[in-house]
Image: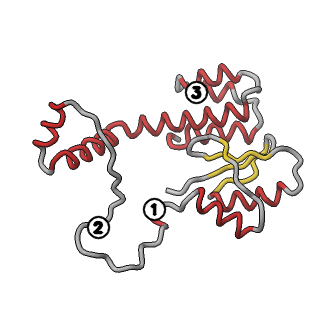
């Protein structure tokens, strides 16, 4: 899935989209700034700085290193596949467990690695909605803290956001600048429309 970024100039939303698209719009607008420009990663709600020096190609080349394309857009290696198992992007890391845990894992079909992968996949399926809701709420809060931290009823709106009281939350932020308010609601609730 591709990361989406949103740029604001003051309280006005400039553009949303992939990093390259946002960076080029910001680069053109930044040449005649009326107000400060902030760029946010929608998935986290955190602000991010893009290096906009040089020509468009230079900016895009630097962004490609900072924000790699999604896995499905990456080009496959050109060399023929060798013998053995394919590289699956597996990263070995240390896991600390008690001996009884290792005994149980090793007794499972396929061994410890297969059993751990199955357990993780099952946990992800079971808590997927809650995890997505938490990530959306956190992203909305990070963005809201930066862009609306000084606006009226910020603290009450934060409490309503974390209490998942959507009606109260949207009522508290109703008088905030339109683009800021709409972006906060989009970050917090777009997956639960």
Q: Provide residue 110's location: percent of width, then percent of height.
A: 15, 51
Q: Number of numbered discs present?
A: 3
Q: Residues within 10 Å of mark 2 (few under 14, many from 20)?
A: few
- Viewer-side residue, 6 vs 38: 38
Which residue in the structure is indicated by mark 1? 71
The answer to whether the residues at label 2 and label 3 have Cβ atoms under 8 Å apart is no
Q: Secondary structure at mark 1?
A: helix
Q: Is residue 190 above or below residue 164?
A: below
Q: Residues within 10 Å of mark 3 (few under 14, many from 20)?
A: many
The answer to whether the residues at label 1 and label 2 have Cβ atoms under 8 Å apart is no
- Viewer-side residue, 38 vs 62: 62
Residue 190: which quarter of the image?
top right
Marks 1, 2: nearer the viewer: 2
What residue do we see at 58% from left, 57% from top? 67
What residue do we see at 77% from left, 36% from top? 177
Which residue in the structure is indicated by mark 3? 161
First along the sequence among labels 1 and 2 = 1
Q: Provide residue 181's location: percent of width, then percent of height.
A: 70, 36
Q: Provide residue 107's location: percent of width, then percent of height.
A: 10, 42
First along the sequence among labels 2 and 3 = 2
Q: Secondary structure at mark 3?
A: helix
Q: Is residue 58 above or below residue 177?
A: below
């Amino acid at each position: 899935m591709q990361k989406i970024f949103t740029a604001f100039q003051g309280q006005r939303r400039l553009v949303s989209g992939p990093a390259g698209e946002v960076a080029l719009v910001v680069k053109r607008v930044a040449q005649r700034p009326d107000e400060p420009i902030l760029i946010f990663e929608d998935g986290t709600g955190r602000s991010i700085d893009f290096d906009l020096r040089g020509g468009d190609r230079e900016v895009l080349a630097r962004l490609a290193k900072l924000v790699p394309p999604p896995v499905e857009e990456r080009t496959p290696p050109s060399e023929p596949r060798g013998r053995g198992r394919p590289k699956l992007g597996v990263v070995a890391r240390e896991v600390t467990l008690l001996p009884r845990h290792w005994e149980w894992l090793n007794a499972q079909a396929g061994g410890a690695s297969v059993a751990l992968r199955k357990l993780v996949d099952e946990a992800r399926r079971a808590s997927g909605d809650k995890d997505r809701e938490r990530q959306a709420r956190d992203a909305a809060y990070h963005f809201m803290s930066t862009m609306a931290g000084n606006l009226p009823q910020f603290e009450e709106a934060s409490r309503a956001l974390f209490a998942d009281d959507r009606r109260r939350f949207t009522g508290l932020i109703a008088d905030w600048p339109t683009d800021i308010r709409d972006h906060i609601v989009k970050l917090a609730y777009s997956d639960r429309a």
